[in-house]
Image (cartoon, grey):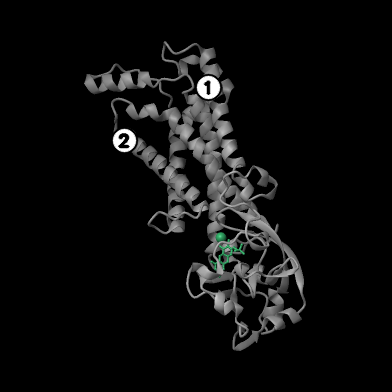
Amino acid sequence: MGSAPDDRPPTGRGGRIAHALQDRLDHPARSTRTTVVIGRLLGLALLMCFATGLYSHYLQDPASWMRFPTWPSNLYQITQGVHVATGIASIPLLLAKLWSVYPRLFQWPPLRSAQHAVERVLVGVLVAASLVEVTIGLLNTYQWYVFPFPFRAIHLALAWVVVGALAIHVAVQLPKIVAHWSGRSREVRGAGVEGVGDGPAPRTAEASRRGFLVGVGTATAAVVLGTAGQSFGWLRRTNLFGARTQALGPQGLPVNRTAAAAGVEQSATDAAWRLVVAHGGRTVALSRADLEAMPQREVVLPVACVEGWSTTARWGGVRLSDVMDLVGAPHDVSVRATSLQRQGGQRVSEMGPEFASHPATLVALRIGDDDLHLEHGYPARLIAPARPGVEQTKWLARLETT
Ligand SMILES: Nc1nc2c(c(=O)[nH]1)N[C@H]1C(S)=C(S)[C@@H](COP(=O)(O)O)O[C@H]1N2
Ligand SMILES: [Mo]
């Protein structure tokens, strides 16, 4: 790591050019210590991003045996907010880390041994996969699906590539990481570790390194503070370039898919609308008036979108479990909700019994004191604690046990 030229004498023309290049790129802020300090933060950000990403993935695509926490009710708002914030933080950290090591691209000879070749290929994979991963993730928060592949599948696959390559990278670099983990260990080892002879005076190098790290830290804090307000209300005043502002849209909530885009403007406002509830052979069809005649509850819950934004509202409606009771459904089964929407991945959602039987899970009819806006799922939508927004199905048509 660092840009210290190889200590071997340059061989041939390529060697001389490579050495001259590395000398040119020598910079007092570039050192193994810099790389380790940034690498620690980047590693932490990537691991948090990975863990929260996996959580989000399994919430949306659970194995049948999986059960999830339903408390706190804004758990998904937190985990997905952290996912997007750590992903965004890793962009300046990744760029800074690459800056601190890129002169090593020109090391000479380029491949010293088979092991060295494998190491370099792995670093290449790690760098490429990380850059693509954070870029498509960022574009996704802006709902800009420019890439010609299914986002979730690729984002997940690349996440495993990044984490796998990262584990190997850390193992390979462990001696350097340990040696430069703390500033003290570096001092103990002295300048000899870094400086090959004629480097700048240690104090200048230290000041330059400090300045660089402060710059990177400031940039990272700026991009996080400038976007995290989309997920967390208390940061909304610094939300300068987050994809959403918290209160945009009818009834103070953003809208992801409009009724027009879902093709439900007619069916959702039709007086003949009924919510069909089914279990085994039993079926009931409920009008909105039927639902309004049932015991009404109120819950305060966020719609927390996978894309990172989140907004909390006061929802009114009927407990899902009360509705399922009408057809004699037991409380330990999963429930599938189907929308009036004819097509699209978010037409159907399924929830395990921990959500279906939860007292805060509602067939929502109102936001605040008003009827649900058509854009938010009128005549009825699902709202449940600790679940991704994409599972909060709007314009409900059918509820059934599975
Ligand atoms: N039927 C249906 N329900 C849906 C969607 C959809 O496209 N179709 N989008 C989901 C997504 S991705 C989110 S984040 C929330 C957004 O809810 P809102 O528009 O009321 O804010 O609705 C969810 N429910
Ligand atoms: Mo969403």
Q: Quadrant of the N terminus?
A: top left
Label 1 neighbourhood size at 10 Å, few (<14), some (14-19), many (20+)?
Answer: some
The amino acid on which the numbered mark 1 sits, given as a three-letter code, is: Arg
* Quarter of the rendered image showing ligand 1: bottom right
CA–CA distance in space, label 1 to label 2 = 30 Å
* Quarter of the figure with residue 58: bottom right
Residue annotated with mark 1: 209
Residue annotated with mark 2: 117
In the foreground, 391 or 223: 223
* Quarter of the figure with residue 224: top right
Relative to 394, say whether 71 is above or below. Answer: above
Q: Earlier in the sequence, mark 1 or mark 2?
A: 2
| Res 399 visible | no
Give how far across and how far down residue 76 sits, in percent: 63, 56
Tag nearer the camera, 1 or 2: 1
- In the drawing, does residue 147 fall left or right of residue 339? left
Secondary element under disc 2, as helix, strand or loop, is helix
- In the drawing, does residue 195 fall left or right of residue 248? left
Q: Quadrant of the C terminus?
A: bottom right
Give how far across and how far down residue 263 sits, in percent: 51, 73
Relative to 127, say whether 138 is above or below. Answer: below
Secondary element under disc 1, as helix, strand or loop, is helix
| Res 108 visible | yes
